[in-house]
């Protein structure tokens, strides 16, 4: 019942949002809507100069806000138990609404600072949030392994856009136009190397972390139901397809899980028999 209410509330919210945007566009548009849209596009959308710089910064801000919202969405009461796709959709909607009304000055102040605050906001926090999101995604949805790849590519591209001038100046032995300094460039370079590593081997790293956690759960005896153990076994069988080089390790853990499942089944049978 609660899940059905959440779905209806989400659909209603999306409909109201779409209606609001539609009414806003209609009320602001002149009679010739097509001509107005073409004129606005010509005046505002450009892939060079100040317009491109502003829209790039706006997109980066949107990605940053959406990633942070998705990372903390598990702790939001009305999203508890919701699927990842619903949480992604809501994070994007809130991110768009948060960034939509920010002007150039606000966007540049937050994103285009190359000192400690700007580097933290645009490099460190997104890296930590993105790593936690992609690791969780890989363990929950190995069949959609392309999603973390797309996220890491987007992060790396935004990283290059932000810092390429500083790296070119450092490589050419010229003064840094952004004033980051040698230590800052080394730190940023390390961050870039981590993002490349996650782009290339993020799935394997995620599965290794998952295996370590699963071994800990088995050792502590914290897998207490047949349903939970069966879910873990099915997950490991999907991992065998994704990373066959770890198949032997997966199979060994699957055998342990099957023994634990049989043990739980016998105990539940004994309890049920005693009750009869």
Image (cartoon, rainbow, N blue to C red):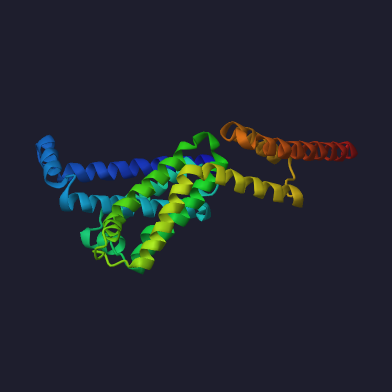
In the rendering, at what x and y percent does residue 174 appear? 24, 63
Using residue 58 as the reference point, say whether residue 263 is left or right of it. Answer: right
Residue 64: image quadrant is bottom left
Residue 9 in view of the camera: no
In the rendering, at what x and y percent does residue 154 appear? 37, 45
- As rendered, which of 192 and 24 lies closer to the eye? 192
Residue furthest to the front in view is 173
- As rendered, which of 226 and 216 lies closer to the eye? 216
The quadrant in which the C terminus is found is top right
- How many numbered marks appear? 0
Query: Would you place residue 210 above or below residue 184 in this image?
Result: above
The quadrant in which the N terminus is found is top right
**Residue drawn where x is 27% and y is 56% of the image:** 168
In the rendering, at what x and y percent does residue 219 appear? 76, 50
**Residue drawn where x is 41% and y is 53% of the image:** 192
- As rendered, which of 189 and 267 lies closer to the eye? 189
Query: Would you place residue 22 above or below residue 118 in this image?
Result: above
Residue 216 in view of the camera: yes
Residue 164: image quadrant is bottom left
């Amino acid at each position: 019942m609660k899940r059905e209410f959440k779905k209806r509330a989400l659909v209603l919210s999306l409909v109201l949002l779409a209606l609001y945007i539609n009414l806003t566009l209609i009320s602001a548009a002149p009679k010739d809507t097509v001509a107005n849209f073409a004129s606005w596009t010509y005046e505002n959308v450009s892939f060079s100069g100040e317009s491109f710089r502003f829209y790039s910064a706006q997109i980066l801000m949107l990605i940053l806000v959406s990633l942070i919202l998705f990372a903390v969405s598990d702790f939001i009461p009305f999203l508890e138990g919701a699927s990842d796709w619903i949480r992604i959709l809501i994070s994007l909607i809130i991110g768009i609404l948060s960034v939509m009304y920010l002007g150039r000055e606000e966007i540049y102040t937050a994103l285009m600072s190359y000192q400690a605050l700007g580097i933290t906001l645009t490099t460190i926090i997104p890296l930590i949030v993105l790593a936690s999101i992609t690791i969780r995604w890989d363990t929950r949805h190995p069949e959609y392994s392309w999603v973390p790849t797309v996220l890491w590519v987007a992060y790396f591209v935004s990283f290059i856009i932000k810092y390429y001038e500083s790296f070119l100046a450092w490589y050419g032995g010229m003064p840094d136009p952004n004033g980051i300094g040698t230590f800052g460039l080394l730190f940023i370079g390390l961050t870039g190397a981590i993002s490349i590593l996650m782009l290339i081997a993020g799935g394997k790293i995620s599965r290794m972390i998952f295996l370590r956690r699963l071994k800990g759960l088995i050792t502590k005896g914290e897998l207490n139901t047949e349903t939970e153990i069966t879910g873990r076994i099915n997950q490991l069988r999907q991992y065998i397809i994704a990373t066959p080089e770890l198949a032997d390790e997966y199979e060994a853990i699957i055998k342990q899980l099957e023994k634990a499942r049989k043990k739980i089944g016998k105990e539940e049978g004994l309890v049920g028999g005693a009750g009869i």
